[in-house]
Image (cartoon, rainbow, N blue to C red):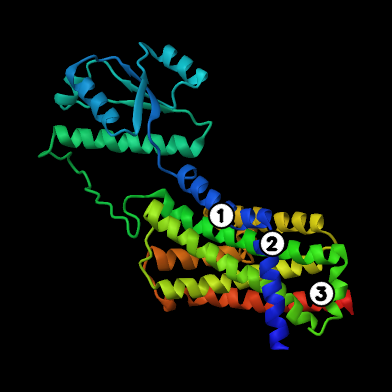
Amino acid sequence: MLKTFIAFVKKEMYHILRDVRTLLILFGMPIALVLIFGYTVTNEFKGASVGIVDQAQDDLSRQLITKLTASGHFELVRKPHNIEALEADFRAGDVKLGIIIPPDFEKYFLGGEGSTIQLISDATEPNYAVTLTNYASQMIRDFQQEQFPTEQMPYAVAIENRMFYNPELVGAYNFIPGVVALILMLISAMMTSLTIAREKESGTMDLLLVSPLNPVLIILGKVTPYVVLSFINALVVFAMGWLIFDVPVRGSLALLLALCLLYLMVALALGILISTRSDSQQTAMMMSMFVLLMPTMLLSGFIFPIASMPAILQFISKIIPAKYFILIEKAIMLKGAGWEAIAIPAGVLLLMMFVLLAAARKNFKVVYD
């Protein structure tokens, strides 16, 4: 029986490896997604278009402008003469942030009387607008401190910020773990569901069921190659995150890979369950996209923080496997945490695996008994 099972697994592996389209999905899609998300989906910004209305035209205002543009985060693309011209630049989409420096800026600033600099942002992209204004505000505060390094405002409270685990706020540190969870879920579950649905659609599943192998071993033989290939995918994605985006693994690599294998088993169990509920590849594809893609992207904490979601969505997120795997990845990779910190999400994934496998086995028996 064991020799028959191994031969069956080898046959399935050969079938996958000689199918160019399957290989492109298995290995081409993960590489493309890592590069796309790693470079485009980020909170960082460079060269944001800025328009500055310099009503002072003095030495200090020019120093401030130099300070704002020297970092490379802002690019001065317009210097309108008045606010009306700046509004026209906003309507045309030429600038994303407007800075208005008032008249006699140097006189009032150096005289200690205070001066108000107005920041105007394009809030059609709210998150981007908040990022730009916050960064510009911080740079203006730094400029003020440079001008008066030994003085403090009366009754001022000094604030010192420290950020653990990602002090430079590198966007890839947040998105690479999410991309890994998304890729493994899509590739493992979707390819598994499509493979088994294809056998059912073509009628070859009935032929397999009368073979010496029992139904459980047939399903295991179908998914085993995807376990191996998906695990290789995980290694490739982690290596790309480290080599290209400098995403660290501060904790145990062995623990991370072991829990990655557990997450793969959850994804494969979900794919098997979808296939037992699908009569065709098209149905399996639609169910995979509906059940896997959107919830994994939107409700796992990959893009949007779960804490800011409505209560009903926070409740639904509790059944999304990717949520727990992302928590595990960030704890091990960024915090260097050990088993004690990830025991609960790992236990949830283990429970999900058994529940999904039991549901898939029950559905498979209902269909073919």
Residue 363, horizontal then vertical, whole percent? 81, 74
Give the answer, above or below, for where 83 lies relative to 210: above
Q: Check the picture and name the quadrant holding the N terminus.
A: bottom right
| Dot 3 alpha-carbon crowd within 10 angstroms: few under 14, some 14 to 19, many 20 or more | some
Q: Which numbered circle lies on residue 30?
A: 1
From the viewer's side, name the closer residue of 199 and 289: 199
Q: Amino acid at mark 3?
A: Asn
Question: How far is mark 1 from mark 3, CA to CA?
Answer: 31 Å
Q: Amino acid at mark 2?
A: Met
Taking the view exactly as shown, the residue that stands out farthest to the bottom is: 1
Residue at horizontal 52 percent and vertical 70 percent from the top: 260
User: Can residue 87 be seen here?
Assistant: yes
Q: Amino acid at mark 1?
A: Pro
111 left or right of 252?
Answer: left
In contact (CB < 8 Å): disc 1 and disc 3? no
Q: Earlier in the sequence, mark 1 or mark 3?
A: 1
User: Can residue 304 be seen here?
Assistant: no
| Dot 1 alpha-carbon crowd within 10 angstroms: few under 14, some 14 to 19, many 20 or more | many
Question: Which residue in the structure is indicated by mark 2?
Answer: 191
Question: Which residue in the structure is indicated by mark 3?
Answer: 363
